[in-house]
Image (cartoon, grey):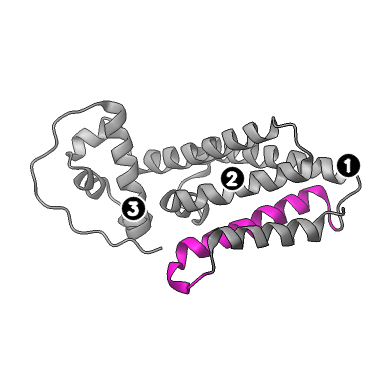
Amino acid sequence: MTVVLKKPHKSARKPKGDGHLRRGEILAAAEKIFIAEGYAGATIRKIADAVGVSSTALYMHFRDKDQILLEISNDAIERLLELNTQIAAQPIDPVSRVRVMLEAYMQFALDNPNTYQLVFCSTGDHISQDKSADVMALGDRCFEKFSEPVHQIAAQGRLRSGSAKEAAEVLWSGCHGLVSLLITKPGRGWSDPDQLMKVMLDGLLHGLVTD
């Protein structure tokens, strides 16, 4: 999805406000600028101007743009991990659990298109492995939580094809592909997103899991 940003007006700086609210404003503005301008084009000054603060004031919240991008990523994955953890605690069979997790994942993407595009549709190569190690580890935890019911299905001998790990990767990547296209190609004239998600899950689960 292409985000067109207007050049910020040279208006008066915003007064100091609540730190948590201002931090949220910075993250929201940064998401749009990262998508529109790319990592190299998203400067601290552009982000600060979009929020209406000075660069100096922004540095009071974040030391650099890497920290901003990592916080956006960390927050998104934490929210998905929380969703998966809540669903994992429900007293439902593993196939239903997988389906509900994937429904929640795709709905999260469509409800937060800028965040999703930035966190899950970019390579992340611009940030060093040392800096991104914690976020990568969190992402692994999120995928492991999603994989647990898939392993349960495999243990029951109900996988038609592949290993539990391969099945989990295919389920995730299939749903990722659908929402990525819906987000990045909105003018394609897609069918109803809810119906597309249902057809995707029906096809994936019926194809991989025996009755």
Alpha carbons under labels 2 and 3: distance apart: 23 Å
Q: Which residues are magenta?
A: 161-190
Identify the residue at image location x=65%, y=44%.
101
Of pointers 2 and 1, the one earlier in the residue sequence: 2
Type of residue at label 2? Ala
Q: Earlier in the sequence, mark 2 or mark 3?
A: 3
Quick one: SS at disc 1?
helix
Q: Quick check: 31 left or right of 142?
A: left
Instruction: Residue at 79%, 58% (x, y): give it.
Output: 206
Q: Nearer the viewer, mark 2 or mark 3?
A: 2
Which amino acid lies under the numbered mark 3 shown in the image of this protein?
Lys
Q: Badge 2: few (under 14), some or many (20 or more) residues near its Cα, within 10 Å?
A: some
Near mark 3 (Cα within 10 A), the count class, few <14, some 14-19 or many ≥20, is many
Q: Which residue is mark 2?
A: 104
- Residue 176 colored in magenta in the image: yes
Q: Which mark is residue 155?
A: 1
Q: Which residue is mark 3?
A: 32
The quarter of the image holding the N terminus is: bottom left
